[in-house]
Image (tube, rainbow, N blue to C red):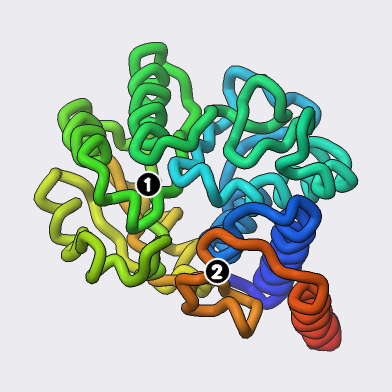
Amino acid sequence: MDAEKRKFLEKQALEIRKGIVLEIYSAQSGHPGGSLAIADVVSYLYFMEMHVDAQKPEDEKRDRFVLSKGHSVPAVYAALALKGDFPKEWLKEFRKLGSRLQGHPNMRDTPGIDMSTGSLGQGISAACGMALSAKACGDPYRVYTILGDGELEEGQVWEAAMFAAQYKLDNLVAYVDNNGLQIDGKITDVMSPEPITDKYAAFGWHVIEIDGHNFDEIEAAYKEAKTVKGKPTVIVAHSIKGKGISYMENQASWHGKAPNDEEYAQAVKELDAALAKLEAQA
C-alpha cells in the first residue's frame, strides 16, 4: 500500500474513533471497546473495499455489509456519516428515544444499514443468506461481515460456518475481531473459542490471520479473499479492544460503559493529537 493511501485510511479511522466516542458520550450508553477495535477495518471496508454509494443506498448491485456483533455499531455509524449517508449531527442522537441511530443496527430506519443485528450469531447467518442469494441470482455483489471473538461462543455461528462451506460461498468474507476480551473478561477465561483459525479451517473455510490494525495486512487479506474459489474466507484479526484511547486499551471494563466529561475530553485530546501528528507527516 502506498503512503498516501495509508495516510488517508488512518485519517478516516481516527475520525471514526472520534465519532465513536462522541456517540457514546452523548448517549451516556454504548460499547466503546469493541467499536474502537474495528475502526481500522471499517475504514478500509467503507473507503476502499466495498462497492457502496451513499447516493444509492439500496442499489441492488451494491456489496452488502452485516455487523454481526451489532453492539459495535458506533464504528459503522461514524463511517456512514463520513461517507455522507446521513448528517454527522445524527451521531449526537445515538441511542436517544426516537433517534434513527439505535444501539444496534436497524435496517428500517438507518440509511446504509443492510441488516438489523444485535442477538449474537444471527448476523453471520443473515450474511450467509445474502451470499447464497447472490449466487442463486447470478448477482456480482460480495458480502462482508464482522464478528466478535466472544460471539464465537454462540452455536449458531458454527451452524452458519457449516452452511457457508456446504454452499461454497466464496463471495462471503467474515472478519473476526480477535481482541481477546468480552464483557466478563478474557475470552479464554469465560468460554474459550480457541483455536479460532483451526476451527474455521476444519469447517472448510479459507483462513487468513492478520494484525487488525495494520492496513497493509488488512488490504492483502481482502485481496487474497477475492482469489479464493469454492469456499468462504475468514480473516482472523488480532486487535486491541479500545484501540486509540490509552485508558481504554485492553480493558474489559470498557466493553459497555460511557466516558464521563473528563474521560471524554481526554479521549478527544488523544485522537486530535494523533490526527495532528498524521497531518504533519510528509
Q: Is residue 136 above or below residue 170?
A: above
Q: Is residue 251 left or right of residue 96?
A: left
Quadrant occupied by the N terminus: bottom right
Q: Is residue 215 visible?
A: no
Quarter occupied by residue 170: top left
Q: Which residue is mark 2?
A: 254
At label 2, counting other C-alpha atoms closer than 10 Å, the crowd grade (few under 14, some 14-19, many 20 or more) is: many
Seen at 58% across and 77% down, the residue is 248
Q: Residue at x 42, y 24 (%)?
A: 130
Residue 137 position within the rendered picture, expressed as x and y whole percent measured from the top left? 40, 12
Which of the numbered marks, if any, corresponds to residue 174? Answer: 1
Q: Amino acid at mark 1?
A: Ala
Estimate the x, y position of residue 146 in percent, counting from the top left.
45, 48
| Vertical position of residue 264 compared to residue 160: above or below | below
Measured as percent of width and height from the top left, residue 253 is found at 50, 71
The foreground one among 129 and 21 is 21
